[in-house]
Each structure stands twice: as C-alpha cells, then as structure tokens.
Amino acid sequence: MSTTHKQIGARTAGAVHWQRFAVPFEYPVHFTERVFDPDNPVFAETVSRLEPNRRHRCLVAVDDGLLAARPGLCDEIAAYAKAHDGTIDLVTAPIPVPGGEQIKSELYFVEQMQKTLFDHHIDRHSYVIAVGGGAMLDAVGLVAATTHRGIRHIRIPTTVLAQNDSGVGVKNGVNLRGVKNFVGAFAPPFAVINDIDFLRTLDLRDKIAGMAEAVKVALIRDGEFFVWLERQADELAVFERPAMARMIRRCAELHMHQIAHGGDPFEMGSARPLDYGHWAAHKLETLTRHHLRHGEAVAIGMALDARYSVLAGHLAEGTEERICFLLEHLGFRLWHPALGNKTTGGRHAVLVGLQEFREHLGGELTITLLSDIGIGVEVHEMDEALVLEAVSWLEARESS
Ligand SMILES: NC(=O)c1ccc[n+]([C@@H]2O[C@H](COP(=O)([O-])OP(=O)(O)OC[C@H]3O[C@@H](n4cnc5c(N)ncnc54)[C@H](O)[C@@H]3O)[C@@H](O)[C@H]2O)c1
Ligand SMILES: [Zn+2]
C-alpha cells in the first residue's frame, strides 16, 4: 500500500491510503442430462465441492411455470435428496415461485423469498438453488446475493435463454417502475447446471426466443458460429436435440469467455459488449408490457441495429438481409407495432430507449453495432433520423 502526501503550497491537503486487492471468481458450468435422476452425481457433487463428507443445508426454489409442465418435479428433487442423504439436507420441500417476468415486477417477491430464507435459518454456507427460467433465476439470484450479503447460489436454468446466456453469467436483478433490472447485483453463482432435458416441456415460443442470444453472440464475436447457425437453421427451427445442445454450449462458452476475458465482468465501464440489439429490445419489452419475450425483442433489436449499421456506413449493404433471413428462418418475427408508438409529447417512444439504456449503465452512451458478421463495433452516438429510417425499413419488410 502506498501513502501519498500532496503539498498545496506549504499546506498538506491530506493523505490517501490506496486499498487494493483482487478476489478470483470461479464457478463450474456443467452440461448434463436428467440432473435429478438419483444416479446422476452432478448435483450432489456440486453441493459437496468445497466440503465433502458432510450434509449441506439446501433450499430449492422452483419456477411454477416449469412445475405446471412437469408436476412431478418437486417429488423428483425430494427423492434425489433422499438418495443423497449424506450430502443434501433439504430444509423444506421445494418451494414454487412465480415464473416469468411476473416475479421481477414486484419487490414483494424478493422480500417474500428473503422471509422464507429467514424462517429456514439459511446461512452463508447453506445453498439457495433456483430451478427455472431466466426471470426467476434473476430474482432468486438477487435474493441470494443480498441476503446475509451473499449466500451460495446454484442455478439450474430450464429455458434455452437461461442455459445459453443469462444463467451462466453474473447478473441478477428485478424491475422497478417499469425499468428493467433497476434493482440488481453482480454476483457470480456458486455453480450452474445445464440440463437440456428440461427443454422438452418448454413452449415453442420460448424455444425460439432463446436462440436470439446465440445469433447475437455469433454476430459480435464469432463469424464461424454464425455460419454454423445458418447451416443448422433447419434443424434448429425444429429444435433437433443435437443441434440445440451444440448451439447452447457454444453460446454459453462465448458468453463465459466475454465475462472472464473481456476485462470488465462487472460492467464498470460504459460499454455493454454483449448487449448488441438490446437497447431497443429493453424498450420494446417495456412498451409491450412484456408481451414480447426478451429473446423476441432482442431479435427485433438486432435486425434494427443491423439495418442501422448499414445506414450509418459500418456494415456492407445486404448483410442486414442475411441476418434477418437467419432470424426469420429460426422462427422470429422482426416487427412489432410498438416500434411505431409515440410518447404523449409526440416523440417516437423507441428513441427514449436510447436515453434509458445510457442511464441504466451510467457514463457515455455506448451502443454495439456491426462492421461485419462476427465483428462488433462500438459507437457513442446514434443518429435518430437513421434509427427511424431503420424502423421504417423493418415495417416495410413486414408488409412486403
Ligand atoms: N441476468 C442476465 O444476464 C440476463 C440476460 C438475459 C436475459 N435476462 C432475463 O431473463 C428473463 C427471460 O428469461 P427466459 O427467456 O428464460 O424466460 P422466463 O424466465 O420468462 O420463462 C418463460 C416461461 O417459461 C416457463 N418455464 C421455464 N422453464 C420451463 C420449462 N422447462 N418448461 C416449461 N415452462 C418453463 C416460465 O414459468 C415462464 O412462464 C428476462 O427477465 C430477461 O431480462 C437476464
Ligand atoms: Zn439478452
């Protein structure tokens, strides 16, 4: 530690002691199948990773939408715990929590979960395990991050989007006053377990929606992966398991690589390198009161920013069509009437999203555009007239 004395004339302005330390974060992301089959050791081994040979107190929250599709799941989890009794101590039967954006819309759910943790004497060495979609993982992750200043948290994502993107990352949060993720925390999980078998019961809409993040990360980081997605589009469009498994794994890897090696895992700077297509997407989610899924909104946001990239001279004309073609082939619709909404002041509502995007991050407006397939480029200004031109282009495509 160094101490600096700053002289102002003859007077000493003060002293500063620089505090500096680094804490390495690491967590495994497992890819497995039938995680709660008693013969599958992954979950039990995950729980006992740091302290084998003892029982670990576990509280499991389960997405109620998932439960509706797979009513026996709580019993499966209880049976698994019983079979691994020497390792897993379920403090209570698995607790259903609201799935989907509903759980993120009210702080009430966060408080209610914290009360449950209090009632069951969950301490910092216990585990809070969340089994479900990205929305409930975001909310339960926030609960785990903030209760006792951080409880061990294991995510078991059950949607395409949560397995290939949100569930493997470090962000948790809920919405407030209609602003996405207004209340949140960066908190890496203790472990993530991806089980592709969960996707069997997923709605068609959610299966498609989750693929948007794969197209996104391919577009900004990995041109070869984009070409692979194009070649596998027929298989992906009907959710063939080997293609889905490979898509999810590659997308998760690219996401994890960005967090570990991108230089800014907790997004202290102005850039949000993984958020291509997201500024408009976040606004569309709010404008449609979440009738659009996150991935559906991201697909539209990516198409919009691809056309904008062309109009602003960053991307070769025609590349935006190639991107739109892939997205449509996978099942996305690239237009929503909310893109035409106006505010009471007569301003195009979508443009307000630019300001909100900057405010959420703080610092300088930073938007990722494309200079080629696989290469993102950051800009700090968006020409509003060109954004509206890109919106009109999408509308014209829709009606042609
Ligand atoms: N933390 C991050 O880094 C990050 C990144 C991207 C998106 N997100 C957030 O993730 C959320 C979207 O997550 P999502 O796309 O996973 O959707 P979701 O969590 O909203 O789930 C969609 C629906 O599927 C149900 N469900 C979940 N698993 C199921 C299964 N296996 N079978 C049947 N039904 C199932 C849910 O109950 C819900 O009704 C948004 O809130 C978004 O902001 C977070
Ligand atoms: Zn996203």
Image (tube, helix red, strand yellow):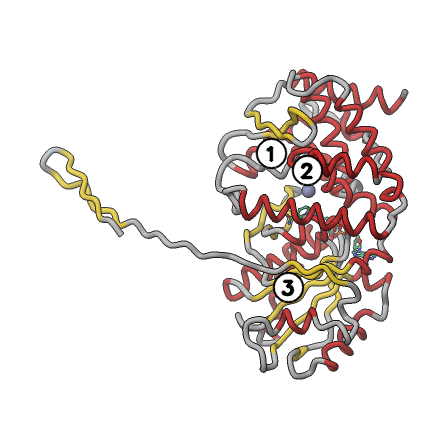
Q: Quadrant of ligand 2?
A: top right
Counting from the top left corner in percent of width and height, residue 273 is at: 59, 36
Left or right relative to 28: residue 396? right
Q: Does residue 261 lie above or below 316 as drawn?
A: below
Query: Which residue is the extreme one toward the bottom?
Result: 86
- Within 10 Å of disc 2 (Cα), the crowding (few <14, some 14-19, many 20+) is many
Callout 3: few (<14), some (14-19), or many (20+) C-alpha neighbours within 10 Å?
Answer: many
Number of other residues with Cα within 10 Å of mark 1, as a class: few under 14, some 14 to 19, many 20 or more:
some
> Where does the image place residue 138, in percent across and percent down from the top left?
65, 54
| Amino acid tagged 2 | His
Whichever of labels 3 and 2 marks the residue nearer the N terminus, that label is: 3
Marks 3 and 2: CB-CB under 8 Å?
no
Pointer 2: what residue?
A: 282
Q: Residue at label 1?
A: 356
Residue 154 circle label: 3
Cα distance between the residues tagged 3 and 2: 26 Å
Residue 274: quadrant of the picture: top right
Callout 1: helix, strand or loop? helix
Furthest-left residue in this view: 10
Is residue 103 toward the left or the right of residue 125 in the image? Answer: right
Instruction: Kindly tell me whether mark 1's CB lies below 8 Å from ligand 1.
Output: no
